[in-house]
Amino acid sequence: MDFISTHLLTSILFFPVLAALAILFFPKEQLRLIRWTALIASLVPFVLSLMLWGRFDASAAGFQSVEQYPWYDAIHSSFHVGVDGLSLTMVMLTTLLTPLAILASFGVTDRVKAYMILFLLLETGMLGVFMAVDLLIFFVFWEVGLVPMYFLINQWGSANRNYASLKFMIYTMGGSLGLLLAIQMLGVTFQTYDLVALYERWNAFNPATFLGMPIETVKTIAFWAFVIAFAIKVPVWPFHTWLPDAHTEAPTAGSMLLAGVLLKLGAYGFLRLVLPLYPAQAAQYAGWLAFLAVMAIIFGALGAYGQNDFKRLVAYSSVNHMGFVLLGVAAAAKVAGTADATIALNGAVFQMFNHGLSAAGMFFLVGVIYERAHTRDLDKLGGLFPIVPVYGGILLFTSMASLGLPGMSGFVSEFLVVRGAWASMPVFAALAMLGLLMTGAYILKAIKKVLHGPLNEHWAQGEHKLTDISAREVMVIAPLMALTLILGIWPAWLLDVVNKAMSMLF
Amino acid sequence: MQFPILSVIVFTPLVTALLILLMKPERKTEVRVAALAAASFALLLSIWVFISYDKTAAGYQFLEQYSWLPALGISYHVGVDGMSAPLVLLTGIVMFTGVLISWGIDDRPREFFAFLFLLAGGVFGVFVSLDLFMLFFFYEIAVFPMYLLIVIWGWVKTREYAAMKLTIYLFLGSVMALVGALAMYWINYQNTGVLTFDMLQLEKAGFSSQFQAIWFMPVFMGFAILGGIFPFHNWSPDGHVAAPTAVSMFHAGVLMKLGAFAALRVGVMLLPEGAKQWAWLIFILAMINVVYGAFIAMIQTDLKYVIGFSSVSHMGLVMLGIATLTPEGLTGAGLQMFSHGIMTALFFASVGMIYDRAHTRMIPELGGMVKALPFVAIAFTIGGLVGMGMPGFSGFVAEFPIFMGVWKTQWLAAVIASISIIVTAAYILIAVRKVFFGEMPEKFEGHITPITALDKVALFTLVLLMTGLGAFPNLMAPMISLGVQNVLRLLGGA
């Protein structure tokens, strides 16, 4: 116990890897054993992160539960992990969604062993990004998390999976090139990768020329290198085109984590690296960022409305919702240090968490119907409410959460973002509200096409008769629904944790 | 007197080669067992050297010196520093795994293992030599058996052509380097009146800048040909493809390192002024290696050619790291030599296993191998991730410092070289998917037999090293940094 409490973060981080190694030695026919081991193994990090939450001091600034070990002395990088309010929230989200995704995958029968191992590795990859306090360690986990996702899409995806998985991988790696180069530049210049040291020294770094260019130019280029890498991951318009493909082809649980956590990595990059490292550039280009954010909100919504594939619709909705996160970041960058900035950032982080809940829920529900009907074509569904009443109710609830209905958590976060942006960028805030209107339109379209309208008799009887959502599936979605509701009614317990970190960010 | 561990390492394969030749040719199993025993012994000793190298003392260790031809100043002088100790370990590993993989060779295994061990002894010798004459001596011992190994056991279609091409290229290179070495020898004699090939003496010779400027390029390039430097890289993919599996492993895994290592040891360390003057040219050539090699690898349809050109690209990174003449770049080059050696040995071993069963290496004809050869699929995939420079694996910890060194030298080059990362990722992912996943062609159904336990041991060893070094770069990087300090000391500054 002592070991765990002094090494809490590394325990959370590496437990899934250990479990994956253990599963490697299981006989591959023992499906039940593999599934349950994976589920229980993914619950351990969740319990540990509850411990972490319990001992977290929300009023203290800086990183907590810090651990540091030598890693790569030759280039001055150490294995340095820690959490603040922002990372803690994201760690909680990850450790919560992973067991749910694994539970949702109990229906998978093809190469279960490899599948579960990849999921556990993916969890470690994601957690590492959120915990890293060393830029190189951040990058290591940032890239390495791609590998399990690539194989999940490539091996368990649907028809067009080769194209989608390669696009996902090359898009993200290509986007990360600029990030990689900028990280190398920082490392060469300061001989350290420690984030806290870099925050201070990079901002104080002010020679007239650097690399033969004015320092301002270098910082601007590096700023955009970071922004593009993270914008691709979020994804922000116009870098979002990999997302619908990846989602459409990914297996259900893969989509849950892709939308629930992987997209947050990009947003997390904005908050953890872009704002603290480039406050001046972020303020200067806040208008551009806000423009991209609003385009994501509006085009994401329009794109979603135009889809007839249920999963693609939900995929585009992620572009729409994540746009609000970037809008919050942009607004905060513009008026750094003010109360408005903190409000916008709180909203952004809260939106990240909420979108994690609602997007994972929506993708799961799409998966539930797809597993039964073997189609996601909205025109072929319709009028299903009487046949699958429980599923219908749950879908309705989750859609409303996604739409941002007051009383649900999405409303609080979107309100905070727009409230924070209102004073400094009223036009963009107004346009974002327009986008919100369109969110309502596509969500209602989806509900109407699936649940209401004339019943497609095909699904009512005979061999195609749909069965209602099973108890196991309800177990997956129930925690998400409960949290959405609780956070909608009483958001303070989470926001308090986030708030301190956000006010210290600059 | 201390135990002459380096000599034992060098002479174990050489003596074994002779002993094996004395055995009866039809006693194939005994030959194999003897080969494995010798390889294991050499591996254990090289691990011992790696572990017991005293990092606080640094410098050359495990020194042995016996005069050999005192009249000409030639002595048998061996020792390792932080740069060569990992390469000795690498050779031990590749030798051990190479023997495991070659267990199934049925065509004159006696001669095969004898030549292979001759090659291995030569390679060990070059890495530990501190005498320029001895270095050349071992260098030729290492290159010569390649010809026979390829021409006798190689791929029927191209073996004569490839063996001849390889031998001519490499001899040409070594002649160039040898002339440079003799020039050093002679000038040093004129300056000091001492006849010596001892590199520790020659390091202090203080050759004039003009002399160094003239002789650096022949010496460096002469050795770098074996490292596959552009535009003299062409022999290498042909040689890889024609060679039998274990020889490809040696060739890409160790021999190419021999070129890069000797170019560093003789070229850069003995002619540091020349290195500073010509670094820009090496830098540009290596850049071409890196980017061009990746593009060429991308359009290959023969899996072995893909790996062959990927080696050209990856060895370009080694040269690039050396050409930066910075602590980061050189450390990265040292790590990359080790990492690439392990990775490419794994690649060629896997390709060999596939080819032995499917009798084709054409990527479009293969598919679905994961079902029949899951172990190979996983190992090859991990090797691919190393090749892509994926963080968490050894390729990243090697390439990252190289890029840092490039940043210090010419930042624009880092931007250009980074293109290769994406190209490499693309061709590796595509090759992995096409060969191992997807539908297995019907003609292979039931024909793909599982790999043996020995094959698995070999693959597992290589995978473990790549992931271990990737997760814990401190296992090796500090040692290489010590070797790098020695290089930097000679370069003056830092």
Image (spheres, helix red, strand yellow):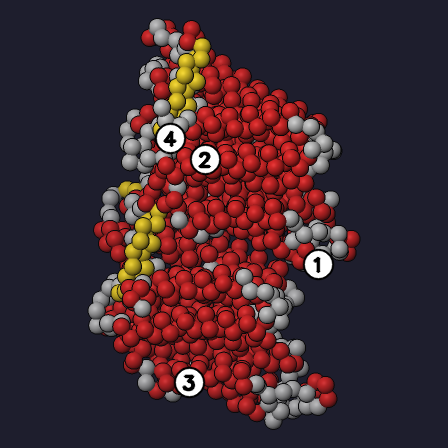
- The residue that disc 4 covers is B81
* Residue appearing at x 37%, y 69% in the figure: A91
Check disc 2 and give the amino acid type.
Answer: Ser
Examine the rendering and report whether any part of residue B465 can be seen.
yes
In three-dimensional space, the C-alpha distance between marks 2 and 3, rounded to whole angstroms, equals 60 Å
**Compared with residue B274, is residue B473 higher up or lower down, i.e. above or below?**
below
First in residue order: circle 1 vs circle 4 = 4
- The residue that disc 2 covers is B46
First in residue order: circle 2 vs circle 4 = 2
Mark 1, other Cα within 10 Å: few <14 / some 14–19 / many ≥20: some
- The residue that disc 3 covers is A482
* Residue appearing at x 21%, y 69% in the figure: A60
User: Are dots 2 and 3 in contact, CB under 8 Å?
Assistant: no
Check disc 1 and give the amino acid type.
Answer: Glu
**Compared with residue A483, is residue A175 higher up or lower down, i.e. above or below?**
above
In three-dimensional space, the C-alpha distance between marks 2 and 4, rounded to whole angstroms, equals 13 Å
Q: Quadrant of the N terminus of chain A?
A: bottom left
Mark 4, other Cα within 10 Å: few <14 / some 14–19 / many ≥20: many
In three-dimensional space, the C-alpha distance between marks 1 and 4, rounded to whole angstroms, equals 50 Å
Mark whose residue sits in front, 2 or 3: 2
Check disc 4 and give the amino acid type.
Answer: Asp
Check disc 3 and give the amino acid type.
Answer: Ala
x and y percentages locating residue B227 in the rendered image = 52, 30
Mark whose residue sits in front, 3 or 4: 4
User: Are dots 1 and 4 in contact, CB under 8 Å?
Assistant: no
Dot 2 falls on which chain?
B
In three-dimensional space, the C-alpha distance between marks 3 and 4, rounded to whole angstroms, equals 63 Å
Q: Are marks 2 and 3 on the same chain?
A: no
